Amino acid sequence: MDARTVLVLNGPNLNLLGERQPEVYGHETLADVEALCRETAQAHGMVVDFRQTNHEGTLVDWVQEGRAGIAGIVLNAAGYTHTSVAVRDALAACRVPRVEVHISDIHAREEFRHFSYLTDVCDHHVIGRGVPGYAEAVTWVAEHATG
Ligand code: CA2
């Protein structure tokens, strides 16, 4: 990874995107999201490092890996958004722009999704704009890259 890299991290169960709940998450798969991110980054002269994990510690390791020396981090922490002080602490230690993304509008869903541990340690938020929200997030990083 280098100063042109946008690190796009995806949390638990996002590998199942497109398989069910299309009324909430749409029909696109995570591979479609990756293609969109790559295309968007390329249009801004950037490259994407795109990853997904179901494991909290792995997400913490990856956020730490991107904490300096890259363009920025786009993160959909999925369920860990609402539970993880560890992911929050890793994001707080970052010196690069951080964008929190959610495909669905977490504020319009069940009460337990309304609170995010990540919101106030991220610099920008793209919430409830569907899969195209990832393109918005990558664009924001490209326009605010520090590296
Ligand atoms: O709206 C989002 O992007 C979420 O981060 C998605 C998470 C959810 O826990 C957050 O509250 C909001 C869920 C990701 C799992 O997505 C699936 C999609 C299709 C089938 C199964 C899971």
Image (tube, rainbow, N blue to C red):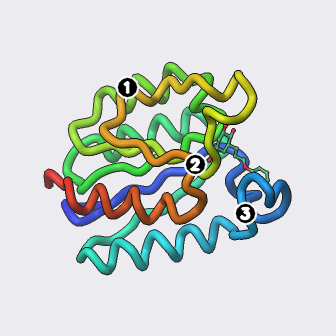
Q: Report the label total.
A: 3
Residue 16: image quadrant is bottom right
Where residue 132 appears, as percent x and y from the top left, is 52, 65
Instruction: Residue type at mark 2: give it.
Output: Gly
* Residue at 83% across, 63% down: 19
User: As drawn, which residue projects farthest toward the top?
Assistant: 85
What label does residue 128 carry, if any?
2
The answer to whether residue 10 is above or below residue 106 is below
Residue position marked by numbered label 3 in the rendering: 26
Crowd tier of the residue under label 1, counting other residues whose Cα lies within 10 Å: few below 14, some 14–19, many 20 or above: few
Regarding mark 2 in the picture, which secondary structure is present there? loop
Residue at point 50% right, 74% down? 36
Q: Which residue is mark 1?
A: 120
Q: Quadrant of the N terminus?
A: bottom left
Type of amino acid under label 3: Gly
> In 3D space, how far apart are the residues under numbered discs 2 and 3 (Cα atoms)?
11 Å
On whether ligand 1 comes within 8 Å of the CB at mark 2, the answer is: yes
Q: Quadrant of residue 120?
A: top left
Identify the residue at horizontal 44%, vertical 26% (top origin): 88
- Cα gap from disc 1 to disc 3, whole angstroms: 27 Å
Return the x and y of residue 89 as percentages of the image width and height: 40, 23
Tag in front: 2 or 1: 2
The residue that appears at 71% across and 23% down in the rendered structure is 111
- Percent x, y of residue 97: 26, 45
In the displayed structure image, the side of residue 140 where residue 147 appears, left or right: left
Q: Amino acid at mark 1?
A: Asp
Whether 45 is drawn above or below 119: the answer is: below
Task: Determine whether the residue tagged by mark 3 lies in a helix, strand or loop.
Answer: loop
Queried on whether the Cβ of the residue with tag 3 lies below 8 angstroms from ligand 1, the answer reads no
Residue 43 vs residue 17: left or right? left
Q: Please name whichever residue, 67 or 140, is drawn nearer the observer in this view of the structure.
A: 140
Question: For the residues marked 2 and 1, what is the alpha-carbon distance in whole angstroms?
Answer: 17 Å
